[in-house]
Image (cartoon, grey):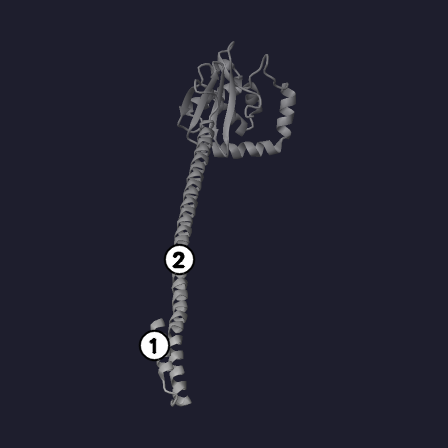
């Protein structure tokens, strides 16, 4: 470029003086154009460089954004997995708790079922699948006992037999028989005969209750005698609740007698 300028200058200096100002001006214009060309190229280089920098910066931002999104997704996925694991653990704990609660409820139910019997595991039990209605034999014993009140008639009778006689006497308001069937003696309270008779005759509600219970008991066909001890027994039967009717054995007479207020 310097060489061109020098050549132009030489041409300009060699121009005859006869050249007009117009010719000189044309030459100057040509020189100016030559001088301006590299400047334009230099000016054009700056926008291209700036554009390249902007594009590069944009690419870098795009890459960084993608990486951050990947990290966010990964973190979100990890959080989601952790939440799912916690949810699963909580469900498992709840299921285990429900299972334990169910097991405890079943255990309580089983225990209550097992306890629906008096006595203990070692107690001797005799189960009778029959009604409390008196057989012909017991009817004959009852009629004779009612007349004589002879306890020897009760020898060899089971607690369940005496239980039947007592309830039959109560139903028919045979108070002498009822009183005679009570266990008396040391450690066995029974009011005197006159007091008992007076209270029983005046207790109309008790008479109605006795009749209702007896009719219900006639519908039961299963009774169990539980021997708490050698000389103590309970007759178990089910009405609205499990009932235990207590009897004691009079060892002197060798007969079973009814406890005063046998159901408690």
Q: Name the quarter where the N terminus is drawn.
A: bottom left
Q: Which mark is residue 232?
A: none
Nearest the camera: 89 or 115? Answer: 89
> Does 224 sit above or below residue 67?
above
Q: Is residue 147 something that shows in the picture? A: yes
Instruction: Work out whether residue 47 or residue 222 is closer to the camera in this orientation and state it.
Output: 47
Q: Residue at x 42, y 51 (%)?
A: 72
Residue depicted at x 37% and y 75%: 37
Residue 136 at x, y percent in the picture: 42, 24
- Disc 2 versus disc 1: distance between alpha carbons? 50 Å
Kindly indicate whether the residue at mark 1 contacts the one at mark 2 (C-beta within 8 angstroms): no
| Residue indicated by mark 2 | 60
Describe the element under mark 1 as helix, strand or loop: helix
Q: Name above or below for residue 1 compared with residue 135.
A: below
Of marks 2 and 1, the one in the foreground? 1
Q: Residues within 10 Å of mark 1 (few under 14, many from 20)?
A: few
> How far across and down, in percent of the image, does residue 90 sit?
44, 41
In-front residue for pair 119/167: 119
Mark 2 vs 1, N-terminal side? 1
Percent position of residue 222, x then y: 42, 29
Q: Number of numbered discs present?
A: 2
**Residue that numbered label 1 is attached to:** 7
Q: Quadrant of residue 138?
A: top left
Look at the image and tell me in which quarter the C terminus lies: top right
Taking the image as shown, residue 154 lies to the left or right of residue 52, namely right
Q: Secondary structure at mark 2?
A: helix
Position of 182 with respect to 65 (left or right) is right
Query: How dense is the environment of label 2, judged by Cα within 10 Å: few (below 14), some, or many (20 and up)?
Result: few
Q: Looking at the picture, does residue 123 appear above or below residue 48?
A: above
Residue 1 seen anywhere in this rendered image of the structure: no
């Amino acid at each position: 470029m310097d060489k061109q300028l020098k050549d132009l200058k030489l041409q300009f200096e060699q121009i005859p003086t006869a050249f007009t100002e117009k010719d000189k001006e044309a030459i100057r214009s040509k020189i100016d154009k030559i001088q301006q060309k590299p400047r334009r190229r230099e000016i054009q280089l700056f926008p291209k460089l700036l554009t390249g920098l902007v594009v590069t910066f944009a690419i870098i931002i795009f890459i960084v954004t993608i990486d951050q999104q990947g990290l966010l997704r990964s973190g979100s996925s990890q959080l989601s997995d952790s939440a799912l694991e916690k949810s699963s653990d909580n469900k498992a704990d709840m299921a285990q708790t429900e299972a334990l609660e169910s097991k405890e409820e079943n255990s309580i139910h089983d225990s209550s079922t097992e306890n629906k019997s008096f006595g203990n595991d070692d107690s001797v039990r005799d189960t009778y699948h029959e009604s409390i209605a008196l057989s012909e034999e017991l009817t004959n014993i009852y009629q004779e006992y009612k007349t004589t009140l002879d306890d020897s008639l009760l020898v060899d009778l089971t607690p369940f037999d005496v239980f039947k006689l007592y309830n039959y006497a109560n139903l028919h308001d045979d108070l002498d028989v009822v009183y005679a069937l009570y266990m008396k003696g040391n450690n066995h309270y029974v009011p005197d005969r006159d007091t008992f008779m007076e209270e029983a005759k005046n207790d109309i509600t008790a008479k109605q209750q006795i009749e209702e219970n007896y009719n219900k008991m006639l519908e039961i066909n299963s009774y169990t005698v539980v021997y708490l001890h050698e000389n103590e027994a309970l007759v178990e039967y089910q009405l609205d609740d499990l009932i235990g009717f207590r009897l004691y054995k009079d060892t002197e007479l060798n007969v079973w007698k009814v406890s005063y207020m046998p159901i408690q």
